[in-house]
Image (cartoon, rainbow, N blue to C red):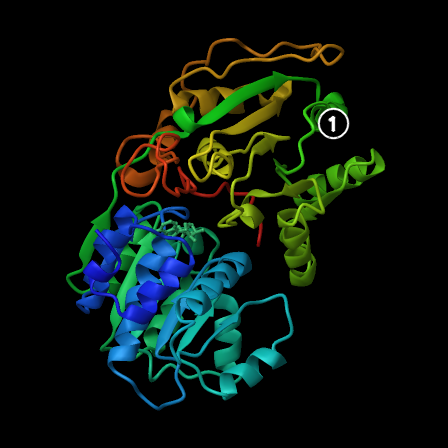
Amino acid sequence: MSFSSLGLSEQLVRATTDQGYETPSPIQAKAIPAVLSGRDVMAAAQTGTGKTAGFTLPLLQRLAENPRTGKGPRVLILAPTRELAAQVHDSVALYSRYMPTKSAVVFGGVKINPQMMKLRKGLDVLVATPGRLMDLYQQNAVRFDEVEILVLDEADRMLDMGFIRDIRKILSLLPAKRQNLLFSATFSKEIRTLAEGLLDNPVQVEVAARNTAAESIIQSVYPVDQSQKTALLSKLVRDNAWEQVLVFTRTKHGANRLTQKLERDGITAAAIHGNKSQGARTRALADFKQGEVRVLVATDIAARGLDIKQLPQVVNFELPNVPEDYVHRIGRTGRAGESGHALSLVSADEGQMLAGIERLLKKQLPRKSVEGFEPSNNLPLKPKAKADPSRARNRNGGGNGKPAGNGRSFGGKPAGRSGGRSQNGNGGQARRSPQRETA
Ligand code: AMP
């Protein structure tokens, strides 16, 4: 199967060839014809599956097939975080490079005036986070009466982040006749309710559930005292000569503190979280991608959707509150068919969280130790019995009863064996814990 056999124009096929894509990913193979046909689409898809191209390529084609001269936007793409919005917009710009299509992205945390100027000039595709889009609307900087296609990307996260009111308001302002595309990693009751009110007889697109975190990612647990974690991390970075490691902390404050300590230890590090200005976040990510910063310390929401190619190493400095976030975090490694490494520094007070993760993975992670860093309290060796069965059941990502994972390569082959390009996803999207972080 090729992109042209899916009915995409020569300009769009050329743009995918420029990117080195050989074959459409499973989600693309299903979503592209559905979007081209003009139908509404409801897709269960995570970042890393190629979903962005899955909706962007056909919607660009639909715009080109039916040129208009208004001010736009004709397509509105809503995304939960600034980073994801920026990434989606990069894709729109990339795939439309051989077309006259104009696009822009707007999100909070940066000045609103330049965004107003951009909108005033007119555009075809607007990518936005819901909050900033509402601000712009209230200041009369954007109108929605020409919107023909609406995309809700990572709808589950948008709801988790409290955007439902903004989304409902935006929906009420759109023309009734339009095409709607909804992408979500999980399908909770709230998402289904949203989908029912939004989608008209949608084509349902789902790619098989994945549980390959265990296959493509080498995972381990280092039991260690809380007070020794930073020193152990420094040692591991040095001893293993890690040049690019993504480290997760539970809180923004913890991310800052760890970054400072690593820097003091002579290891270049940067933090990325919701309290950082957009400029600082973009800079930290760029420095990390270019190898100027060895350690990127992130909180869960800030890391969401980041597409960092071939990340070799992920470290959980602290375990996440929600077990599915563990799968999501480690899904940042082992990309492109490579086997990745994920290790967790776990102190005795995190024993319950580890047990929850091991229950979700249905296996025990191997314990490792480093001389001089043995913990004063050992972690339990066996996962304990379920503490809260209702919670575990509700949080089992994907609604398919299986733990969602990652590591599927495009073309349907298992990750780690395919010769082609492949990407892993953000498996196991979970409902967010009550302590929310705004990204
Ligand atoms: P997404 O799930 O949209 O975030 O895409 C994940 C990654 O896969 C991005 O880096 C894309 O550039 C890449 N990608 C998208 N489609 C393909 C394809 N058909 N073949 C190979 N890589 C792709």
Which residue is disc 1 drawn over? 238
Is 335 or 13 nearer to us in this picture? 13
For the point 31% across and 88% down, which residue is it? 68
Q: Secondary structure at mark 1?
A: helix
User: x, y (%) of residue 75?
Assistant: 35, 74
Q: Name the image quarter holding residue 423.
A: top left
Q: Is residue 382 left or right of residue 350?
A: left
Is 158 or 48 nearer to us in this picture? 48
Is 114 or 80 nearer to us in this picture? 114
For the point 36% across and 41% down, which residue is it? 420
Q: Can the viewer see residue 409 in this picture?
A: yes
Q: Is residue 105 left or right of residue 11?
A: right
Locate the C terminus by quadrant: bottom right
Q: Can the viewer see residue 150 in this picture?
A: no
User: x, y (%) of residue 395?
Assistant: 38, 35
Residue furthest toward the bottom?
69
Kind of residue at badge 1: Arg
User: x, y (%) of residue 426?
Assistant: 43, 42
Vertical order, 206 against 130 (above or below)? above
Is 3 or 132 nearer to us in this picture? 3
Mark 1 close to ligand 1, CB under 8 Å: no
For the point 49% across and 64% down, which residue is it? 90
Q: Is residue 68 left or right of residue 270?
A: left
Q: Name the image quarter holding residue 103.
A: bottom left
For the point 31% across and 57% down, which residue is it? 54
